[in-house]
Amino acid sequence: MRTLLFSFLFSVIAFPAFSQDGKPAATAQITFEKMIHDYGTISQGADGNVEFTFKNTGKQPLIISNARASCGCTTPIWPKEPIKPGASGTIKVGYDTKRVGAFTKTITITTNSQTPETVLTIKGLVNAAPVEETFPGKKVEGAVPLERQ
């Protein structure tokens, strides 16, 4: 009885391993043109929008279930409809350039792809906008002094 039980368990466990033909499963596969965008040095308040273009290089429709930014200053927008095999799409990312200084932010894309999570990166340096200052006693061209009463 033990031998029969052992033989049955062995065949149940081993059969799937031997039945695979070594080919990867037919799934969706997301492939990006670039995964990092460097804004370089930009001015405070500049356009912080960028698009990441991708293609479904797999055999099944690609579904993007989520795009999660590493902080609230970055907002991703992704296609909600399935992307057919061979078709392309874009993920739009906006960065709030009102924040001054160097930044590196990530956007985690969750899909039904062979690799379920893909990380995109944006980075750059936002320089402060110039501020015009006026100091008391400074003469301003064309200004008329107030009369004292």
Image: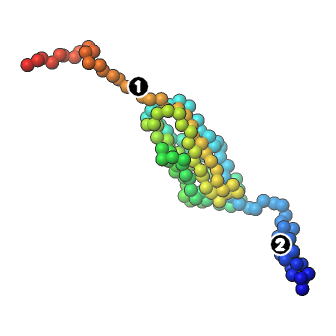
SS under mark 2: helix
> Is 143 positioned to the left or the right of 120 in the image?
left
Graded by Cα atoms within 10 Å as few (under 14), some (14 to 19) or many (20 or more), the crowding at tag 1 reads few
Q: Amino acid at mark 2?
A: Ile
Looking at the picture, how far across and down is residue 69, in whole percent? 54, 48
Point out the frontmost of discs 2 and 1.
2
The image's mark for residue 66 is none
What residue is rendered at 55% in x and 34% in y? Answer: 124
Q: Quadrant of the C terminus?
A: top left
Name the secondary structure under disc 1.
loop
Residue 13's disc number: 2
Q: Nearer the viewer, residue 149 or 22?
A: 149
- Residue 23 versus residue 98 in the image, above or below: below
Which residue is painted at 58% across and 45% down in the image? 106
Most foreground residue, 3 or 59: 3
Residue at 65% across, 46% down? 32
Give the residue type that dot 1 points to.
Pro
Q: Is residue 90 above or below residue 18?
A: above
Considering the image in quadrants, where does the N terminus appear? bottom right
Front position in the image: 8 or 93: 8
**Residue furthest to the front:** 2
Spatial CA distance of label 2 from label 1 is 70 Å
Question: Residue 28 placed where, x, y %?
Answer: 68, 58
Question: Do we see residue 107 in this rendering?
Answer: yes
Residue labelled with disc 1: 130
- Identity of the residue drawn at 87% across and 68% down: 18
